[in-house]
Structure formats: structure tokens, C-alpha cells
Amino acid sequence: MAVPGVEWAIWELMGTGTERARRKAASLGRICRRWAAASAADGERGNGCPAASVVPPAMMAS
């Protein structure tokens, strides 16, 4: 499930924002729904950052 504050902001932009803001909000809404669906499919709680478990490789000295 998406963060309630994010959902609220998306709905506000969809209802009262400019045309560009509405398009961006719609895109963000689709991303949030996909992320929530993927989190549910993986059995995650969905309340953490999806990239929190990703560790970047160490920088190699040149």
C-alpha cells in the first residue's frame, strides 16, 4: 500500500492541479500502484524503501 500522504497529494493534484501536474500525478499514481502490487507479491509489508536492501558496489580506487 502506498503512503497515505503520497496518495493524498496525488489526488489533490489530479483534482486541482494544472494539466501538466495532472499528468505527472497520474504517472506517479501508476508507479505507486505497481510498487504496492510488487511489494504484496513479494510478501513485504510495503512500508519501507524498496531500494533499502540494495547495496551499491564499493568504489574501486583508480
Image (cartoon, rainbow, N blue to C red):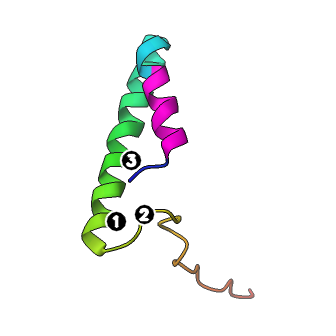
To which residue does mark 3 refer?
Answer: 32
Residue at the image point whose x is 36% and y is 46% from the top: 31
Determine contact: label 1, label 2, CB under 8 Å.
yes
Badge 3 marks a residue whose secondary structure is helix
Residue 8, position in %: x, y? 49, 32
User: In screen coordinates, is 36 left or right of 60?
Assistant: left
Q: Nearer the viewer, residue 47 or 17?
A: 47
Q: CA distance from mark 1 to mark 2?
A: 5 Å
Looking at the rendering, which quadrant does residue 19 occupy? top left
Q: Which of the image's four quarters has the C terminus?
A: bottom right
To which residue does mark 1 refer?
Answer: 39
Residue at the image point whose x is 57% and y is 81% from the top: 55
- Amino acid type for the residue under numbered disc 3: Cys
Magenta stretch encompasses residue 12: yes
To which residue does mark 2 refer?
Answer: 46
Question: Magenta span covers which residues?
Answer: 4-13
Q: Is residue 24 above or below residue 15?
A: below
